[in-house]
Image (cartoon, helix red, strand yellow):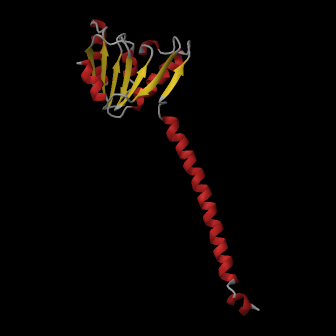
């Protein structure tokens, strides 16, 4: 009887079925873990588009802060109405990240605040610009087009989105 069982491959079949079940179980667990990792990676990335409702002051501030914190090399804020309050956001950048603020409102106070910030968190550079209406936040090479002034995000209904129609280099060249 045992001889017949072995000749028909019963023992081998049982082992093969057992291994296949284990492999299916491992595949299922691996897929579950991949989904969890994807969730956490996506949760830490800034959204590529969205709406900030009126009176959502914290959401607006947190969105801008998340963009600043996500920069690995460079953060550029282009906002004709940017003032020294924007420097509080810039202070959230990681060490070694360069920061540039383009504004039509750079004054003595803003220069003093930037100098103070640079003593502790270099490198922040202020640049004057004119003839720009829209607002942009550039995180490394990703350009965000923002409907409201960075300092006022969340005051009124506004939208933001990633702008793919132009490169960072092209946009910065236009500002010169």
Picture coordinates of residue 153, whole percent (x, y): 47, 15
- Residue 106: quarter of image: top left
- The foreground one among 174 and 101 is 174
- Residue at image position (67%, 79%) is 13
Residue 122 visible here: no
Report the residue that reaches farthest toward the left. Answer: 176
Residue 139 visible here: yes
- Residue 65: quarter of image: top left
Give the side of residue 4 with respect to residue 83, left or right: right
Report the residue that reaches farthest toward the right. Answer: 1
- The foreground one among 51 and 60 is 51
Q: Tell me the quadrant of the picture where the N terminus can be found.
A: bottom right
Report the residue that reaches farthest toward the front. Answer: 165
Picture coordinates of residue 58, whole percent (x, y): 53, 18
Picture layout, residue 57 above or below residue 168: above
- The foreground one among 170 and 98 is 170
- Residue at image position (68%, 77%) is 14
Give the side of residue 113 with respect to residue 37, left or right: left
């Amino acid at each position: 009887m045992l001889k017949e069982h072995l000749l028909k491959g019963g023992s081998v079949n049982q082992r093969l079925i057992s291994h296949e079940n284990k492999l299916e179980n491992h595949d299922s667990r691996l897929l579950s873990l991949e989904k969890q990792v994807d969730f956490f990676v996506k949760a830490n990335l800034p959204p590529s588009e969205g709406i900030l409702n009126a009176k959502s002051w914290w959401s607006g501030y947190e969105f801008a802060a998340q963009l600043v914190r996500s920069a690995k090399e460079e953060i550029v804020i282009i906002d004709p109405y940017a003032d020294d309050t924007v420097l509080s956001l810039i202070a959230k950048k990681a060490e070694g990240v360069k920061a540039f603020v383009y504004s039509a409102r750079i004054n003595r106070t803003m220069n003093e605040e930037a100098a103070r910030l640079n003593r502790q968190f270099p490198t922040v550079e202020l640049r004057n610009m004119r003839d720009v209406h829209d607002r942009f936040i550039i995180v490394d090479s990703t350009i965000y087009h923002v409907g409201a002034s960075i300092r006022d995000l969340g005051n009124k209904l506004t939208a933001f989105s990633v702008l793919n129609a132009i490169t960072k280099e092209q946009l910065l060249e236009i500002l010169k």
